Image (spheres, grey):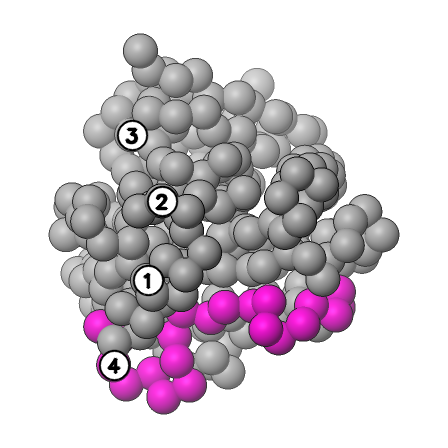
Amino acid sequence: MPSTPEFHCSKTASETFSACAAFLAERLAEAIRERGVARMALAGGSTPRRLYLTLAEHFRDALPWDRVEFYFGDERNVPMDHPKSNFLMARQALFEPLGIPPHHTFPMVSDHQSDPEGDARAYEATLRRWAASSVPRFDVALLGMGEDGHFASLFPDTPALNERDRLVTVNPVEKLHCHRLTLTAPVFEQARDVVFLVIGAEKRPAVARIREGYTDLPAERLAAGRPTDWFVDRGSFGP
């Protein structure tokens, strides 16, 4: 039986970031109470940056942040100090303001950034070191959704969508003329909580498809196959 997404709609983007931040802080704190450590897969891009700034500014005292380990759902194949690096964005907006120990942050791309396949294999080995089963179970996986229904770097009509054995893969994205590292669908399917953060009227058609139960595009299939929480503003959700 298909799962029903849970939508949390706020009037403004700022209210959406605050609501999502509170939800994440609660889930991470619960994981720490139950297992001693919380592990989170982060999303990249401009929208999550505002969420991370909100967490760092308003939720500093909500939990012991030094007991959270931060991983990434995907990454551009650029150096860690590149302006488009998801790791750099998270380091500046979240890790440094909260004083997260460097050994609790796990970038997908190595310093040399010359061997993406090697980086993918190394990241998979990192995940398997703490996985109790064949697929690691993140406490929280934070995701965005593109207008084309992609999440992480699992884009429509790309090879990584069919990967069920590897945890991390290099996915060629022809329409962007690049390749990206990404966690694969089984990892997101096994996370304890999957949280989508979607802002802006340009995302309204994609959100409408989720609400209507379509299962064609990557985010639609994930939402239909397991519980998901969606933090959206009025612009993306509609009247």
Q: Which residue is mark 1?
A: 124
Q: Earlier in the sequence, mark 1 or mark 4?
A: 4
Q: Which residue is mark 2?
A: 133
Q: Which residue is mark 4?
A: 115
Residue 56 percent across, percent down from the top left: 75, 58
Name which residue lies at 39% across and 26% down. 226
Q: Earlier in the sequence, mark 2 or mark 3?
A: 2
Whether residue 48 is visible to the viewer of this picture, yes or no, is yes
- Looking at the image, residue 223 sits to the left or right of residue 161; the answer is right
Q: Specify the amino acid type for callout 3.
A: Arg
Q: Which mark is residue 221?
A: 3
Q: Earlier in the sequence, mark 4 or mark 3?
A: 4
- Looking at the image, residue 14 sits to the left or right of residue 211; the answer is right
Q: Specify the amino acid type for callout 4.
A: Asp
Distance, label 2 to label 4, CA atoms, is 27 Å
Q: Earlier in the sequence, mark 3 or mark 1?
A: 1
Q: Main secondary structure of the magenta part?
A: loop
Distance, label 1 to label 4, CA atoms, is 14 Å
Front tag of 3 and 1: 1
In the foreground, 174 or 68: 68
Q: Are marks 2 and 1 in contact (CB under 8 Å)?
A: no
The quadrant where residue 235 appears: top right
Residue 151 percent across, percent down from the top left: 37, 45
Q: Image quadrant for the C terminus? A: top right
Distance, label 2 to label 1, CA atoms, is 13 Å
Residues drawn in magenta: 97-117
Q: Are marks 3 and 1 in contact (CB under 8 Å)?
A: no
- Looking at the image, residue 81 sits to the left or right of residue 101; the answer is left
Give above or below for 39 relative to 203.
Answer: below
In the foreground, 16 or 136: 136
Q: Image quadrant for the N terminus? A: top left
Secondary structure found at label 3: helix
